[in-house]
Structure formats: structure tokens, C-alpha cells
Image (cartoon, helix red, strand yellow):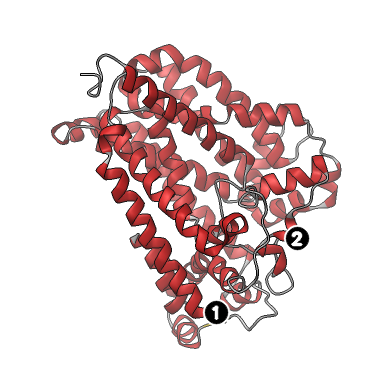
Amino acid sequence: MLYLSGTLLLLKYGPIDWPIKNELELWSLNALYLSMFLVGYGAALWQRHRWTSRGGVPSSRDFTARFFWPIWACATLVALIGHRNLTLGPSYIPTSLFSDFIYGLIDPLGAYLYKLSDEAKENFSGNPLITLLFGVLAFSKLVLVYMLASSWPSLSRLKKILGSALAIFPIVSGVCVGTNKPVFDVTFVFTTIILAHVFMTPRAERLQFIKSRRTLNLLTAFIFVFAGAYFHHTMSVRAPGLEYAAKSLHSTAGVIRVRPGFQEYCETSGEMTAKGCHLFSIGAIYLTQGYYGMSLSTDIPMETTYGVGHSKFIVDALRKYLGVDLAPRTFQQKIHEQWSATSQWHSAYSQWANDVGFLGVAFVMLALGFYACAIWTSALATHNVAAVCSIPLLTMLIIFIPANNQVFNIFESLTTFIILFIAWVTSLAFGQRSPGSPRAA
């Protein structure tokens, strides 16, 4: 709630002056959405006994001992397939991994532009069956990090090294093509899962928990710092300077500019302040441009997208494999001439509205608040593997609401979300039937 409210304040008073349309509708809808999220959260909290049954939930140590190597093998397949799909490489064995990584560090813009080039796309041939396997097994990456966090002291040195190396491999893939998303994904996963374990540990034992995982905590801290540094590095070459950053946001509905007062302050301050201003403005653009697209859409009549318009991946797949093109029915496509449907970001609210309308999004937020509370209380009370592994996805989903529908737009995270949700619901069903559960007692 505080975060989403903060992004709205950033939209209103931040460094970018957005020519917002339908301002009253935009603010009213956002107030409604946040209120409904709170209502959903409160409703799940009131029924928290439903999410706190320990029956049928194995201990983390037993789970890790039984499934570490199968999960590691699945995560290895996912990492190799994901690397090839991201880099558009010729083979599933990345023979040029080191040189590509160094190139992405030195020249992230060159690596990024090559990935987008026709040459790279023409040399790549995907396999739908392998991509399907990739989606089905993608959840294993999250489970692997869960195992590292929960059982680190009892893991052998071999498991620690191989598990950690595999868990951070997507960072290497992201750097190879000069993109930040895989780097941030790994950062979110490590940070949220470790913090969840800290909160799951009794207060008197938390210090010992942290001490027993010094190496893992140092690795997480390094990932966090690297993510910030690499983001600044890539953005400094993609969008150098405040004016360039604003000019990259093309809209025929109005002039997008840096606020004069902010720009004057940045230009008259020292070099370090100017760099900080640039990074802050880029972050503000990422977090608020989706609201601008939403403001252009609120007065446009809705055409149903039959429950799939919230996911760009599903819309694209229907067009590619079945010849069913639902894109023209989406709000994003309807405002394409004013705000590009492909090169600019659109808030998750706008994408959910493709299916249920902007008023209907209030009920989506109600369900999201309910789910967020249920997952969190389930993780804290029972250490449920599926619940804990769902926390990073839930965090990314909420953080990216102002920007786009991050989780459901991408095949990997979409399938992971669905599989973990089914696993969590199934574990609850078995837990409630377990003789040792509170309900059965």
C-alpha cells in the first residue's frame, strides 16, 4: 500500500512532468484499487486459520534432503534453455559464455542492440516443445533458492557451490545481452526468500539464523549491489542525460518533459548529484509511465478479450499458433498512436482492464490482497514451500503494477505462478484433511 501510494506521489510530484489525461478518473480508480486491496487483505487475515494448517507440509530439511538433486537437475535444464532463448544463441551449450559476459559488461548497449537485430533473430530457431518444457520446470529455480536459504548449514560444500552458481546463472545470461530484467529477478528471488526465512524463524533464533548463513547473505548483498550498479551502467549508455531520457518517451497526446526546477537543480549541482538525478529520473520513468498510458485509456470503451487480455504472452501465442488476434481489442493497442503498445510500458491495471474493465480491476485487487495475505500467513505459520516460493513472484507482481503486468506477460513467470498456486492449494487441501491438523482436531 505504501509503495503503490508512493508511486502515485512520484507520478504527481516526481522529476517527469507527464501530460496526464482524465486525471480525476485516474486518481479515483487508483484510490478504489488500493482500498479494495486492503479489504481483500483483511478478509484473508480474518480467515487466517485456513492458511495455517501444518498437516501435510514436510519440514524444510526433509524436503531438501529428498529433492535437492532432482530440483537442481531441473533448474539446470531451465537455466540452459532460458539462456539460449534470451541470447538467441545457436546451441543449448553456451560455448561463448565468458566472452559474451565480458562484452555485456563492457558494452551493454551493443549487446542489447545485437539481441534486437534482425541478424540475431534470423540465426535463432526455437523449439515449441523445449520451450514448453522450460515453462513447466521453471518453478525449480525458485525452489532451489528456497533450499539454499532453508538448509544452508546442513548442505555439503558441493551442494552449496553448485546450487549457488546455478541460482545466479540468470544474471550471467542477462549481462550477456545487456538487459537488467534477469539481474533484478535474481535479486528479488534471493532477497525475498531469505527475508521470508528470517521472519519465519522465531525472534530469539534470528541472529543465529543469520550468522549460520554468512556466505549466503554476503552473496545476496553482492547480487543486490551488482544489480544497482549494472542498472546504472546500462541506463547511462542507453539514456545518457535527463533530456535524452525524457525524449525517449514519445507521445502524440502531449509533451513529456523533465520538470524545469528538477533539471535546473541537477545541472547546477556537482557531478555526483547529477549522476544521482539521472538514476532517479530513470527509475521514476520506469515506475510511472504505465500510469500515463492508463490515463489515456480510462474513457475508451471496453471490448472483451475473453479472459486472456491481461497477458501479452497469451495474446501473442493465440495470434501466432491459432491465428486469433485479440490485440486490437486491448486498451494498449487502442492508444498505440498516442502511446506505443510495444515500446512503452502500460500498467498492470490497464492490462487487467482488457478483461474486466477499469471498474472490474477493483475486484482483481480484492483477490490480489486476499491472496497476498493468505500466502504470507501460510509461509510464516507453516513454512509451506509453495507459499514461500510464491513470495518473490507476488513481490514482483505488486512492485511492477505501475509499470506492467510483469508476472503474467512472460511465459516463465506465468507458468511458475500457476504451478506454485496449484501446489499451495493442494497442500492446503491435504493439510485440512490431515489428522494432525488443527481443523481435524
Q: Pointer 2: residues within 10 angstroms few (<14), some, or many (20+)?
A: few
Q: Residue at x 40, y 37 (%)?
A: 219
Under mark 2, the amino acid is Pro
Asked whether 94 or 20 is in front, the reply is: 20
Instruction: Name the element at disc 2.
Output: helix
Q: Residue at x 40, y 73 (%)?
A: 9
C-alpha distance separating marks 2 and 1: 22 Å
**Image quarter for residue 213?**
top left
Q: Pointer 1: residues within 10 angstroms few (<14), some, or many (20+)?
A: some
Which of the marked residues, 2 or 1, is nearer the chain's N terminus? 1
Q: Residue 328: which numbered mark, if any?
A: 2
Above or below: residue 32 compared with residue 230 = below
Above or below: residue 254 compared with residue 273 = below
Asked whether 185 or 168 is in front, the reply is: 185
Above or below: residue 432 compared with residue 253 = above
Is residue 164 in view from this perspective?
no
Please name the residue that numbered disc 1 is placed on.
22
Image quadrant in which the N terminus is located: bottom left
Q: What is the x, y in percent for residue 224?
A: 42, 47
Q: What is the x, y in percent for residue 273?
A: 42, 74
Asked whether 350 or 63 is in front, the reply is: 350
Q: Residue at x 41, y 65 (%)?
A: 32
**Image quarter for residue 327?**
bottom right
Is residue 67 in view from this perspective?
yes
Q: What is the x, y in percent for residue 412?
A: 60, 37
Q: Are marks 2 and 1 in contact (CB under 8 Å)?
A: no
Q: What is the x, y in percent for residue 211?
A: 24, 32
Under mark 1, the amino acid is Asn
- Please state if 54 lies on the left or on the right of 265 as rendered: left
